[in-house]
Amino acid sequence: MVQLIVGEKGKGKTKILLDKANAEVKNANGSVVYLDKSTKHMYELNNKIRLIDVMEYGIENSDEFVGFIRGIVSQDHDLEQMYLDGFLKISRLESCPENISKVMASLEKISETYKISFIISLSKDEKDLPEDVKHMIVTSL
């Protein structure tokens, strides 16, 4: 399952994502991973959540990002949930937002294959998203 929390920058998506991750880790049977563009939120996350600063890994485009996600999945067979904050930046979609549909389709496929939930904060207004990803929206700010 892929869930989107959407809204313009500064609307409070990260707070919702952090709260959701901290609440869900208490009931999780497997691993929970939080991908971000820095380690700024390290002390706001439960210590059972693995925080990964994606910017440390030199990802240059959205295809490499999907490969990075697949690498995380391949190393953790207990992975249950993955939270992605600052999605456009960490996935390298800021310069080519037209690839959002392609990346979301890849994440949906990974989710279905490995039974992993992806919860994503996306700095775009709902009306500016492609039609084929709007069904993933759970919160629009």
Image (tube, rainbow, N blue to C red):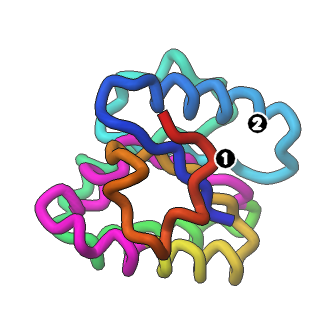
> Which residue is at a point 38% across and 80% down the rendered structure image?
102
What residue did someone put label 2 on? Answer: 25
Q: Is residue 116 visible?
A: yes
- Up the image or down, 113 lies above or below 35; here it is below
Residue 101: percent from left, percent from top: 39, 75
In magenta, the rendered stretch is 79-103
Toward the top, the furthest residue is 43
Q: Is residue 71 visible?
A: no
Residue 116: percent from left, percent from top: 69, 65
Quadrant placement of the N terminus: bottom right
Q: Identity of the amino acid at label 1?
A: Val
What residue did someone put label 1 on? Answer: 32
- Mark sitting on residue 111: none
Q: Are marks 2 and 1 in contact (CB under 8 Å)?
A: yes
> Which residue is at a point 45% across and 71% down the rendered structure image?
131
Q: In the figure, residue 63 lies in which quadrant?
A: bottom left
> Which residue is at a point 25% across and 50% down the rendered structure image?
89
For label 1, the SS is: strand
Q: Residues within 10 Å of mark 1 (few under 14, many from 20)?
A: many
Residue 35: percent from left, percent from top: 45, 46
Q: Identity of the amino acid at label 2?
A: Val
For label 2, the SS is: helix
In the rendered image, residue 68 lying in the magenta stretch gets the answer no
- Taking depth in this image into account, of 8 and 77 the one nearest to the observer is 8
Q: Is residue 83 left or right of residue 89?
A: right
> Mark 2 and mark 1: span between their CA atoms?
7 Å
- Up the image or down, 41 lies above or below 92; here it is above
In the rendered image, residue 101 lying in the magenta stretch gets the answer yes
